[in-house]
Image (cartoon, rainbow, N blue to C red):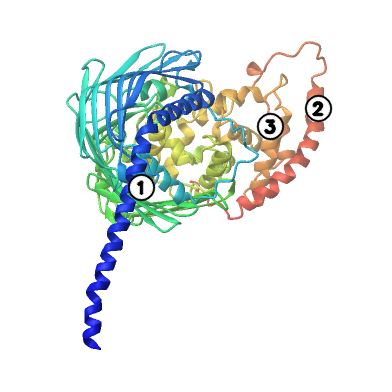
């Protein structure tokens, strides 16, 4: 029995081998027949494919695709000669003498087209913009979907979409490529810029290519490796010409960028099922210089910086991976960012630095950008925590918190702006935009300088309430006001409203120009923080300086000049009505005289300010020791006769103006009731105001 079984195994093995050989042979025959058939009809298939491409470019983008001749030059290689791409009613976009491309065979068997080799000879791509039209408009033109009613909704997750994008890009990147005499130029009404590659190669993913700007005006070297199958990339860009700007973007966007070295690495694209995609990489830079007029008036120079980490993309979210780090010199922090697209568009940002040396932060600031802080020396560690979240479709529910532990921080030496010098006499340079008006001495030698205890208490109350109710409580910043300004700016989709405290206004007037740039605002925030944190200048002294330097009219600076100019009084003699008026024009001082009619009385629309802030001071019990006339002194305010506008033609009875003011006041009072209810919520906590 055993012997018979042993004899059957060799026979069974022979049968299996026989059928295996037959199966393989059949497959090979089928493949061979398919190959022979494919080779016999591939010319027709190529003609059909080229025809489809021509028609699609014409229909979708209004591009005319012309090719002299084309043919297969290998099993999977196609050679195109004398290619031209010309948009309708525009100049030629591209001209190529030779374009040869081959695809990888194995992926092709499964319907996956991946480029293996590419050759490009004498290629000239010209982007031309004339007036309001260009030959590349098609890139930004929305495609009209003729079958929109039958189009199926894209149900792919965000991770799937990004994954598909990576695949599409890397599938088009060849493992081997040869470039010869390839140029890309941009021409507009003012200039022409061209980048040129005389010769370049990608050899099994490795590349080292020189790129020249404007006939060798400058040269950049691109070196690194690209692996399309693994979807990894590394590139190091260096230049021999220091300070040469990256072409094209300055003309298009007004952004000027130069660098000595810039490198980028994409290390991993990991797919974790259907819903998760992880992208890991980073960048490094040396002497990166950036300039844009909205960023700063001077170029931003970053001597050394790097970032490493990644992005985690899920079904409906994209967020920075935990551990993502940004480093500038010795200062390092881990930012947190997350965007959710469904069911609500929510943006979240956070920074939690942990304890770090404060000097490392100031050393990391771009060189020369913040002149007032140049040379500053500090001691001690600080820690900063910020959390921000907003529903972009419902910004009213924005959440924002900002906390700093700077209890150990000490300013050892001030920079160009010596905050401690504010305690003594100093000269304030009054500017109107960029024009210097005059010098104002802040001490007793100036007859207009008014110490805080010689200013009417009611003036101080009205200014504090209108400009900064919690000046004596906060550390330079009012979180609620800042949050309200963020909500407004998000709604308006532009910088519409600031959140300046008296401390911020003072720093801006004393040390900064009036240009509205991001860097100037950041410098203002840093200086206010240091000024308030150091406590080297008291709140009373800061308020005293503020009242003596701010503008109250055309070439009218300080409370003494304002009191005399409008009312012929000293600051100590101001009434509640006069104080409320003066506080109303601080945001727009040059429009102050427009508040008055020809009788010297205030125009009706100013009453809103009186009722709003008079009501606030009443609720805060700040008027118990004041004589408060009707409507908080609105009708008692009178401008000096020499400043009043001329009487309008046909007006005889000057008393009619006062009567009209009373009539309109009743209606405005009713409107203000709604404002008062809102303000009660904002001012639910008692402002702390200190006086000498």
Q: Quadrant of residue 13?
A: bottom left
Please indicate whether residue 669 sits to the left or right of residue 73 in the image. Answer: right
Name the residue at the bottom extreme: 1
Q: Nearer the viewer, residue 274 or 177?
A: 177
Mark sitting on residue 660: 2
Nearest to viewer (mark 1 / mark 2): 1
**Quick one: SS at disc 3?**
helix
Q: Earlier in the sequence, mark 1 or mark 2?
A: 1
Please indicate whether residue 286 sits to the left or right of residue 667 in the image. Answer: left
Residue 536 visible in rendering: no
Mark sitting on residue 243: none
Disc 2 crowd rating (10 Å Cα; few below 14, some 14-19, many 20+) is: few
Q: Nearer the viewer, residue 11 or 64?
A: 11
Determine which residue is flagged by label 1: 30
Mark sitting on residue 606: 3
Q: Residue at x 50, y 13 (%)?
A: 89
């Amino acid at each position: 029995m055993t012997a018979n079984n042993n004899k059957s195994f060799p026979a069974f093995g022979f049968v299996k081998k026989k059928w295996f050989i037959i199966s393989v042979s059949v497959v090979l025959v089928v493949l061979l027949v398919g190959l022979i058939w494919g080779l016999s009809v591939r010319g027709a298939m190529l003609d059909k494919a080229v025809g489809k491409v021509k028609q699609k470019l014409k229909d979708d983008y209004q591009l005319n695709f012309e090719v002299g001749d084309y043919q297969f030059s290998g099993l999977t290689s196609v050679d195109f000669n004398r290619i031209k791409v010309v948009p309708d009613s525009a100049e030629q976009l591209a001209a190529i003498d030779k374009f040869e491309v081959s695809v990888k065979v194995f992926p092709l068997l499964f319907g996956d087209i991946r480029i293996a080799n590419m050759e490009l000879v004498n290629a000239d791509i010209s982007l031309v913009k004339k007036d309001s039209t260009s030959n590349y408009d098609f890139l930004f033109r929305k495609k009209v979907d003729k079958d929109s009613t039958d189009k199926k909704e894209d149900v792919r997750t965000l991770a799937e979409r990004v994954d598909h994008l990576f695949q599409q890009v890397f599938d088009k990147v060849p493992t081997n490529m040869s470039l010869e005499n390839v140029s890309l130029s941009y021409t507009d009404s003012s200039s022409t810029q061209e980048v040129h590659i005389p010769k370049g190669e990608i050899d099994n993913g490795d590349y080292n290519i020189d790129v020249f700007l404007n006939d060798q005006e400058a040269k950049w070297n691109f070196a690194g490796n690209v692996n399309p199958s693994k979807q990894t990339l590394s590139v190091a860009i260096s230049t021999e010409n220091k300070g040469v700007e990256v072409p094209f973007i300055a003309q298009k966007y007004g952004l000027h960028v130069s660098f000595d070295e810039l490198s980028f690495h994409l290390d991993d694209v990991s797919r974790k099922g259907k819903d998760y995609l992880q992208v890991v990489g980073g960048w490094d830079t040396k002497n990166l210089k950036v300039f844009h007029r909205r960023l700063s008036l001077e170029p931003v120079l970053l001597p050394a910086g790097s970032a490493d980490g990644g992005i985690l993309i899920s079904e409906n979210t994209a967020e920075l991976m935990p551990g993502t780090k940004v480093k500038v010199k010795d200062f390092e922090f881990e930012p947190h960012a997350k965007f959710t697209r469904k069911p609500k568009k929510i943006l979240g940002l956070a920074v939690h630095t942990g304890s770090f040396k404060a000097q490392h932060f100031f050393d990391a600031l771009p060189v020369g950008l913040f002149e007032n802080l140049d040379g500053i020396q500090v001691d001690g560690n600080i820690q900063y925590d910020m959390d921000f979240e907003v529903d972009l479709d419902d910004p009213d529910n924005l959440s924002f918190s900002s906390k700093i532990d700077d209890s150990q921080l000490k300013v050892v030496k001030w920079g160009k702006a010596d905050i401690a010098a504010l305690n003594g006499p100093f000269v304030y340079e009054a500017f109107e935009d960029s024009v210097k008006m005059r010098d104002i001495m802040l001490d007793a030698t100036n007859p207009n300088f008014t110490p805080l205890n010689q200013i009417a208490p009611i003036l101080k109350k009205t200014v504090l309430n209108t400009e900064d109710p919690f000046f004596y409580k906060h550390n330079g910043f009012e979180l609620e006001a800042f949050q309200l300004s963020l909500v407004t700016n998000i709604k308006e989709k532009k910088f519409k409203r600031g959140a300046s405290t008296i401390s911020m206004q003072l720093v801006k007037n004393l040390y900064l120009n009036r240009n509205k740039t991001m860097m100037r605002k950041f410098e203002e925030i840093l200086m206010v923080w240091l000024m308030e944190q150091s406590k080297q200048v008291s709140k009373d002294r800061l308020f005293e300086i503020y009242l003596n330097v701010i503008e109250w009219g055309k070439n009218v600076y300080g409370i003494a000049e304002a009191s005399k100019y409008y009312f012929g009084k000293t600051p100590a003699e101001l009434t509640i009505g006069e104080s409320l008026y003066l506080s109303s024009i601080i945001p727009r001082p040059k429009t102050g005289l427009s508040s008055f009619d020809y009788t010297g009385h205030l125009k009706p629309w100013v009453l809103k300010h009186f009722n709003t802030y008079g009501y606030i001071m009443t609720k805060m019990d700040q008027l118990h020791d004041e004589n408060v006339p009707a409507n908080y002194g609105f009708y008692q305010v009178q401008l000096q006769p020499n400043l009043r506008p001329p009487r309008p033609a046909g007006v005889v009875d000057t008393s009619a103006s006062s009567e009209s003011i009373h009539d309109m006041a009743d209606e405005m009072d009713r409107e203000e009731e709604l404002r008062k209810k809102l303000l009660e919520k904002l001012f639910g906590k008692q402002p702390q105001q200190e006086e000498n």
